[in-house]
Amino acid sequence: MEIDLSAIKELTENGRERLPNRRSHELVDFQHGGFSYTAGIGRFADGRVAEIFLNAAKTGTAVEAAARDAAIVASIALQHGASPATLQHALTRNGDGTASGPLGALLDLLAARECAAP
């Protein structure tokens, strides 16, 4: 019996899924809570979200630092096997169900895009 090794995820010693050296990266501009953000989305070879970069238009502010830190933690979680949906549902929500923070808003946008894709 032959085993297809291409389907096996390459993991580092600490269980983090290794990212391809060359990978697609898309930029997403959006607004949340009165601030403008630009997100960078990196993907694994199979198209799953692997990393998130999140910057606020107002550089050097606490808002940008919090957004960047949230994206770093999200990227670490994604590379250790968490799904974007798990992160999306774990983040704080407003009373109307909308995301309280920019990372949640970005994950909502990505989820809406996937649902709309043919």
Image (tube, grey):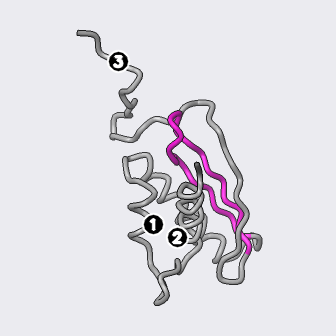
Along the line of sight, the residue nearer the viewer: 93 or 117:
117
Circle number at residue 104? 2
Outermost residue on the bottom side: it is 95
Q: Residue at x 40, y 69 (%)?
A: 89
Question: For this view, does 9 lie left or right of residue 114?
Answer: left
Outermost residue on the front side: it is 118
Pointer 1 residue: 88
Crowdedness near tag 2: few (<14), some (14–19) or many (≥20) residues, C-alpha within 10 Å: many
Q: Residue at x 70, y 68 (%)?
A: 30
**CA gap, disc 1 and disc 2:** 6 Å
Along the line of sight, the residue nearer the viewer: 105 or 53:
105
Location of residue 16 in the rendering, given as x and y in whole percent from the top left corner: 39, 41
Location of residue 17 in the rendering, given as x and y in whole percent from the top left corner: 41, 38
- Earlier in the chain: of badge 1 and badge 3, it is 3
Location of residue 50 in the rendering, given as x and y in whole percent from the top left corner: 51, 46
Pointer 3 residue: 4
Q: Which residues are magenta?
A: 36-56
**CA gap, disc 3 and disc 2:** 36 Å
Where, quadrant-wise, is the N terminus in this rendering? top left
